[in-house]
Amino acid sequence: MPVNHVKKAEFLIETKRLILREMTQSDYDALCKIMCDEEVMRAAYEQAFTPEETQNWLNRHLKRYEECGFGLWAVVLKETGEMIGQCGLTMQSWGERKLLEIGYLFQKAYWHKGYGTEAAAACKEYAFTVLDAQSVYSMVRDTNTAAQNVALRNGMKIIDKAIKNFRNTDMRFFLYSAERSEESMP
């Protein structure tokens, strides 16, 4: 069930190799390459999403853009214009707290090329300089060493761990955090 969301994608962040922008309905097929891939999704959610769950995911982020001004953004290769992943900022629950999280998921073909680190670093900078956040977090499964390495390369440290339940499955997560430094103040 596509959302009738005609808004044109807005430019948000540019890095050396990437553009991060709001997703639109036209990104659905590229998003399915991530969300419906068993291997990609096993790392984060234990199992792939269905096409309908992927549409619901996209709808949530389109709504987040309107309500919060941010969400997970399309990660697009400058060189080709192809959407290769998603990375951005969302408010997530950790216990009783709501935290500003940097989240990321990429197509398997683009793993281990530094794109996750490049996009996550840009999101951290955006959180500190544009949103004036004091800290940012990443919630990473204890079995997802690649995503843990992205958090570490993004200057984050583990500050907590917990069991979270996604789709009726208990999974252990690490909570990574980075604090705003003097040089990242606006």
Image (cartoon, rainbow, N blue to C red):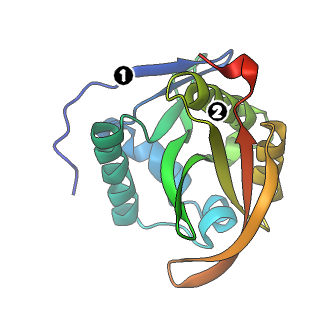
Residue 140: x and y in percent read 70, 59
Classify 46 as above or below 182. below
- Residue 29 screen position, x and y as percent: 41, 45
Of residues 162 and 83, which is closer to you in this image? 162
Residue under the point 52% across and 50% down: 33
The residue furthest left is 4
Side of 97 relative to 148 (left or right) = left
Name the mark nearer the viewer: 1 or 2.
2
How many marks do you count on the picture? 2
Which residue in the structure is indicated by mark 2? 124
Residue 102, percent from left and from top: 60, 44
> In the rendered image of this protein, does residue 118 appear above or below residue 85?
above
Q: CA distance from mark 1 to mark 2?
A: 19 Å
Q: Position of residue 183 (x, y in %)?
A: 74, 17
Q: Is residue 5 above or below residue 61?
A: above
Q: Which residue is found at the position 48% from the left and 36% from the top?
A: 73
Disc 1 designates what residue? 10
